[in-house]
Image (cartoon, rainbow, N blue to C red):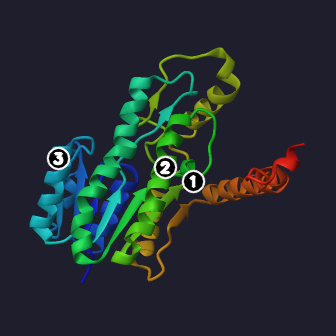
Amino acid sequence: MKKVWLITGTSTGFGCALAKELISQGYPVAITARHLDQIAGLVEDHDQAVALTLDVTKKDQVRNAVDQVLDQFGRIDVLVNNAGYGYFGAVEESDEEAVRKLFETNFWGLSDLTRNVLPTMRKQRRGHIVNVSSIGGLTAFPAFGYYHATKFAVEGLSQSLAKEVKPLGIHVTLVEPGAFRTDWSGRSAVDRTQVISDYLETAGKRLKASHANSGKQAGSPELAAKAIIKAVESENSPIHLLLGKDAVKNERIQLESVKEDLENWEDVSTHVDYGNEDFWK
């Protein structure tokens, strides 16, 4: 029996590619987007696929979407929290109202949908929650500080959740892509509203390069979709699924950086307990 999938943010990018791949493989799937007209065509002539309106920042729509999926299929086996977008700008340049909206979608929307699906998965004693994070949830670059903050939050929540639900037969996987040919740095991105010249050589350069590379990224969303399905169907599903050679490379660099700090500062780090006062004399 094929798993029932619920996916958010399927109008473009990873969500759209994953929806198409699942439908082509005959999975029962509920696809969602804020604007139903953008995804309705994906489910035409497919009895096992349904398209739903869902803005993950609206609690009533979250509850209704979960109820509709259960009414249609009777269960939810896989939840893919994919809805999200990028925000570009140095930390000091960033608009607080825009950043709070970013958190509402990238973090709180994911959290709310997860909490609404968990009672069903607990009752089933099985399920898989796939949270689309980013290599930007493991390491950081200039110009993306607040976007990174949302993804680091997703990482922490997901890793804690994984430990809580593992005894209940529920798995959690973090998908951590590098640069893929999606709209993330194109029309879906939100940019800073002010420019501070002191950051032109750091955040400014990174922002310009990211926009220039939009549509030219090496990563294929279609192949990423296949990788996500393989991870979910695996008997040994990973908690971390990095996608893309650049993601793997950047995570290795990050791990080496942490290892270097651990080794260089171990003496200081391990002499801060009561009884270690003589070390500081």
* Residue wearing tag 3: 61
Task: Name the residue at 44% across, 83% down.
Answer: 235
Nearer to the camera, 212 or 248: 248
Q: Residue at image x 39%, y 44%?
A: 106
**Of pointers 3 and 1, the one earlier in the residue sequence:** 3
Side of 172 relative to 195 (left or right): left
Q: Measuring from the top left, give residue 2's x and y in whole percent.
A: 26, 79
Task: Tell whether label 2 touches label 1 (CB within 8 Å).
Answer: yes
**Which residue is more in the foreground, 94 or 190?**
94
Query: Residue 124, relative to residue 41: is it above or below?
Result: below
Where residue 7 appears, as percent x and y from the top left, is 29, 58
Q: Residue at x 28, y 50 (%)?
A: 112
Q: How many marks?
A: 3
Q: Which mark is residue 181?
A: 2
Classify mark 1: residues with Cα within 10 Å, few (<14), some (14-19) or many (20+).
Answer: some
Q: Quadrant of the C terminus?
A: top right
The mark found on residue 218 in the picture is: 1
Q: Amino acid at mark 3?
A: Gln
Residue furthest to the front in view is 275
Task: State if disc 1 and disc 3 touch (CB < 8 Å).
Answer: no
Q: Residue at x 50, y 24 (%)?
A: 94
Q: Position of residue 142 (x, y in %)?
A: 63, 34
Residue 42 vertical position relative to residue 168 in the rendered view, above or below: above
Classify mark 2: residues with Cα within 10 Å, few (<14), some (14-19) or many (20+): some
